[in-house]
C-alpha cells in the first residue's frame, strides 16, 4: 500500500507493540542500517505523525530510491530527521544555526505537529500554531487550503498573497479573480475544487507602503510540505494542477519549466495525474495586453484539460 493509502491510529490503551514472526519470506526486503537507527529513534518521539513519516520513508526506500537517506533536501528525509533527538540527528546533515544565543532551535519541518488522521478542518486548525519556519513571523495569519474533501481536482499555488494574508483564504486577491474567470469560462465550479498553496504563510518585503511578494526559499517549502502532503492524503484527488513554477518544481521536479512542459500530464504518488500551468498572477504581470491574453488562454486551456481528466470517457489530448 502506498503511504497515502495507510492511516496509522494509535491505541492509547496499548502498552507495547506485538509483532508476529514473518512467515512470508517473499515479502521481505532489505533497508539500510541507518534507516533502522533513525526509525528506532523516531519511534520514541511524541509526534502523532511519526508512524506515517517512518512508513513513507520506508516505502520510498523500497520502491523509489534505496539511497533516499543520502538526500538531505528531501522533505520526507527532513521530516524523519525532525523526529530525531538533536544529539543523534542525521549524521552528515548540517543543523541550522541557532537564530540567537539561548533561543530554541526552530524545527525544520512541520511534520511533528501535523496531526495524524485529521480531516481538513483538523489540519487547518493545527496549522494555526505552526512555527516550523520563519514565515509565520511577518504574516497576519496562516492561509490553509479551502475546498471540499471530495474534490477531484486540487489546485496548488505558491503562497498566499497580500489579500489572502489579510482575508485568510487562498486565491481571493487579484490573481484569484483571474483564476475565478478561467474556472468560470471552462465551467468548473470553484466550490468543487480544493485550492491550496505550497507554503501557507505570506512571505513579503516592504516597499514603501506596499508589501511585495518574495519567493519562498527551499527550506521554507520543505518545512511546509507536510501540510500539503496531509491535505493531498485527505482529498486524494484525481488531478493536481500546479499553478506556477514554484509549485511545479516542488511537486513534479526541480528541473520543471512551465514554458517547456506546461499542460503535460504525469503520474504522481498523490494523484493519478499531475500537471502544471501558469500561475494566474502571470497574467497580471504580462507586459502588454496581448501577452496577458496569451498567458490567460494557456491557463484556461490547461485547466480545461485537467477538468477533462475527471470526466470518464474524455481523455485529454496527451493521454
Ligand atoms: S510557512 Fe508553513 S512551515 Fe512555515 S510557519 Fe507557515 S505553516 Fe509553518
Image (spheres, helix red, strand yellow):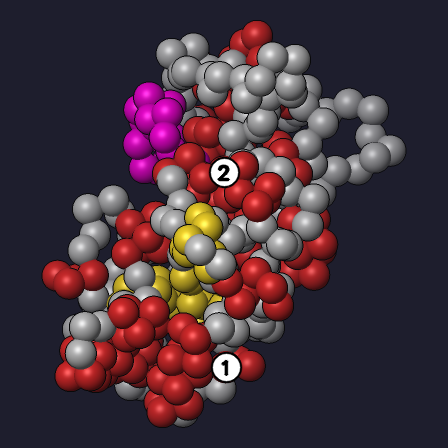
**Residue 72 locus on image (x, y percent):** 37, 25
> Ligand 1 closer than 8 Å to the CB at disc 2?
yes
Work out whether mark 1 precedes mark 2 in sequence or the reverse, and give the earlier one: 1
| Viewer-proximal residue among 167 and 49 | 167
**Is 131 drawn above or below residue 46 in the view shown?**
below
**Is 249 on the left-hand or right-hand side of 211?**
left
In the image, taking residue 190 as reference, residue 240 lies left or right, namely: left
For mark 1, give the secondary structure. helix
Residue 123, position in %: x, y? 66, 53
> Is any atom of residue 186 visible in this view?
yes
Tell me the residue that label 1 is attached to: 190
Q: Which residue is pictured at 28% across the width and 75% down the height? A: 283
Quadrant in the picture for the C terminus: bottom left
Give the camera-side residue of 41 and 63.
Answer: 41
The magenta segment is: 61-75
Q: Residue furthest front?
A: 208
Would you identify the image quadrant in which residue 113 lies? top right
Label 1 crowd (10 A; few <14 / some 14-19 / many >=20): few
Q: Nearer the viewer, residue 199 or 122?
A: 199
Could you tell me how far apart the alpha carbons at marks 1 and 2 are, in whole angstroms? 28 Å
Q: Is label 1 in contact with label 2 (beta carbons under 8 Å)?
A: no
Q: Is residue 92 above or below residue 209?
A: above
- At a point 45% along the width and 67% down the height, the residue shown is 154
Instruction: Tell whether position 63 is magenta.
Output: yes
Which residue: 70% across, 44% down? 129
Say if the magenta span includes residue 1.
no
Q: Which residue is mark 2?
A: 223
Residue drawn where x is 51% and y is 23% of the image? 81
Q: Is residue 235 left or right of residue 284?
A: right
Circle 2 Cα neighbour tier, 10 Å, few/some/many (<14 / 14–19 / ≥20): many
Amino acid at each position: 500500500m502506498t503511504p497515502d493509502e495507510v492511516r496509522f491510529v494509535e491505541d492509547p490503551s496499548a502498552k507495547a507493540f506485538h509483532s508476529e514472526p514473518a512467515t512470508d519470506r517473499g515479502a521481505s526486503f532489505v533497508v539500510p542500517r541507518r534507516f533502522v537507527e533513525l526509525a528506532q529513534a523516531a519511534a520514541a518521539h511524541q509526534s502523532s505523525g511519526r508512524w506515517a513519516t517512518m512508513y513513507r520513508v520506508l516505502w520510498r526506500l523500497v520502491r523509489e530510491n534505496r539511497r533516499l537517506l543520502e538526500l538531505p533536501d528531501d522533505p520526507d528525509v527532513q521530516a524523519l530527521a525532525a523526529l530525531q533527538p538533536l544529539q543523534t540527528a542525521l549524521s552528515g546533515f548540517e543543523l541550522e544555526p541557532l537564530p540567537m544565543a539561548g533561543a530554541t532551535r526552530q524545527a525544520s519541518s512541520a511534520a511533528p505537529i501535523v496531526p495524524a488522521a485529521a480531516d481538513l478542518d483538523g489540519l487547518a486548525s493545527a496549522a494555526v500554531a505552526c512555527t516550523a519556519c520563519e514565515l509565520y513571523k511577518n504574516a497576519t495569519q496562516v492561509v490553509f487550503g479551502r475546498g471540499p474533501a471530495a474534490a477531484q481536482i486540487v489546485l496548488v499555488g505558491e503562497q498566499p498573497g497580500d489579500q489572502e494574508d489579510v482575508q485568510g483564504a487562498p486565491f481571493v486577491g487579484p490573481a484569484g479573480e483571474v483564476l475565478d474567470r478561467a474556472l468560470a469560462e471552462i465551467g468548473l465550479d470553484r466550490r468543487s475544487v480544493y485550492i491550496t498553496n505550497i507554503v501557507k504563510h505570506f512571505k513579503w518585503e516592504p516597499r514603501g507602503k506596499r508589501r511585495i511578494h518574495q519567493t519562498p526559499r527551499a527550506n521554507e517549502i520543505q518545512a511546509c510540505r507536510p501540510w500539503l502532503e496531509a491535505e493531498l492524503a485527505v482529498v486524494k484527488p484525481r488531478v493536481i494542477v500546479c499553478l506556477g513554477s514554484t509549485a511545479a518544481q516542488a511537486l513534479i521536479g526541480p528541473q520543471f519549466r512551465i514554458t517547456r512542459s506546461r499542460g503535460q500530464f504525469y503520474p504522481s504518488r498523490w494523484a493519478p495525474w499531475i500537471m502544471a500551468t501558469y500561475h494566474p498572477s502571470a497574467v497580471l504581470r504580462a507586459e502588454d495586453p496581448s501577452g496577458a491574453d496569451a498567458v490567460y488562454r494557456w491557463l484556461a486551456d490547461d485547466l480545461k484539460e485537467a477538468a477533462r481528466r475527471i470526466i470518464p470517457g474524455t481523455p485529454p489530448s496527451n493521454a
